[in-house]
Image (cartoon, rainbow, N blue to C red):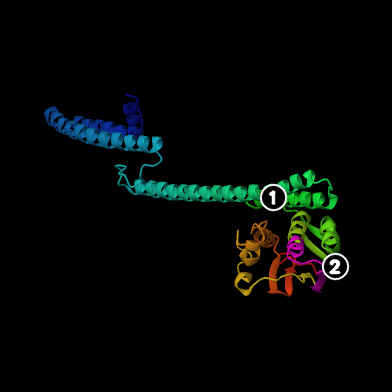
Amino acid sequence: MKLFIHYLKDRLFFIMIYVVSVFVCFCVFKLYNLELEAFTYAFMLLCVLLVVCFFWDYYKYYKKHQTLVTLQSNSNVSLSCNLQDSSLMGEDYHKILVAMKEYHDEYVISSENKMHDLEDYFTMWVHQAKLPIAAMKLLLEDEELSRSEIKLQLLRMDQYTDMVLAYLRLHSTHTDFLFKELELDDLIRQSIRRFSTEFIRKHIQLNFKETGDVILSDEKWLVFVLEQILSNSLKYTNENGLISIYMNSKHVLVIEDTGIGISASDINRVFEKGYTGINGRSDKTASGLGLYLCKNILDMLNHKITIESNVGKGTRVILDLTHFEGRIE
């Protein structure tokens, strides 16, 4: 009954037109003194035709309603089903529904892919986080407790935590970038201080030439990038090695080490997510996410990164810190 009432409301305009038409015909018959029998005959024919059209139209209205109710209750129903509306407006609505369904499917697939990526990342992160925890347990059992080793393992835990936070923020729709003019030397010193214990432990010499440069960037995110690059240099540079930090040209920073280097087969893939290469397979703590995050962060900061390396000689990481949408001269 409720559906029938809604149908009458939707067709009220056409019902009114029919009633007015019958009234006009009746008035014409009266004005010209035509026989009422002829009017009655025409009226009855119109009524029969109206009833047939009414039932046919109501049947289509009912089927369309049932189809829409089914679609509403089951999102998996194909939109190719017949909505009993072949009008131009009906086709337009159908095209809109198809477009919305395609967008919904793409969004679901994208969300599922992101969820799988997060699951994979957290699984890998948990395994990595267990390594320094296990190392600290062993150190605590040792009678000759090494404070430097404890600090090293805590530093690694801190790095893993920063990495997972960066990964989550990078894939968030609300990445908290704050661009301002920054003293590059202050950011470099901040990054060096964090790894001072590691420099001392491995007896690695640091050659830092002050740049005196001012850049337009985000402090928190750029420091994260610098720390990741320094961490890699320290990890793959042998004891008594050398790490140099200097300005190649205006806004172009170079971090160079005398480490084991990167093979030619790996150099073009170092920015891929999860790719560790030959060096990573020999180092169980490698995640393959550090340089991936660096590349993505620098892209969002409108900076550039390139890597040059020779196996057995070392690696040069070149950071073009020019802000390409608002260059500081």
Compared across the picture, whether 311 is left or right of 255 comes to left
Is 268 magenta? The answer is no
Q: Quadrant of residue 319?
A: bottom right
Look at the picture and state if 105 lies above or below 205.
above
Compared across the picture, whether 269 is left or right of 237 comes to left
Q: Quadrant of residue 34?
A: top left
Rendered residue at 74%/72% (across/down): 316
- Identify residue for label 2: 205
Q: Quadrant of the N terminus?
A: top left
Percent position of residue 250, x then y:
80, 72
Instruction: State the mark number for residue 307.
Output: none
Look at the picture and state if 65 lies above or below 297.
above
Magenta range is 229-249
Rendered residue at 48%/51% (across/down): 106
Tell me the SS state at disc 1: helix
Compared across the picture, whether 64 is left or right of 268 comes to left
Using a 10 Å C-alpha cutoff, classify the residue at mark 1 as few (fewer than 14 neighbours), some (14 to 19) or many (20 or more).
some
Percent position of residue 146, x then y:
84, 50
- In terms of sequence position, does the residue under pointer 1 or pointer 2 come before the other? 1
Front position in the image: 310 or 96: 310
Which label lies toward us, 1 or 2?
Answer: 1
Rendered residue at 64%/47% (across/down): 126
Is 243 magenta? The answer is yes
Using a 10 Å C-alpha cutoff, classify the residue at mark 2 as few (fewer than 14 neighbours), some (14 to 19) or many (20 or more).
some
Front position in the image: 213 or 143: 143
- Identify residue for label 1: 131
Percent position of residue 173, x then y:
63, 49
Can residue 157 be seen here? The reply is yes
Residue, far front: 143
Can residue 190 be seen here? The reply is no
- Identity of the amino acid at label 2? Gln
**Distance Cα–Cα, label 1 vs label 2:** 27 Å
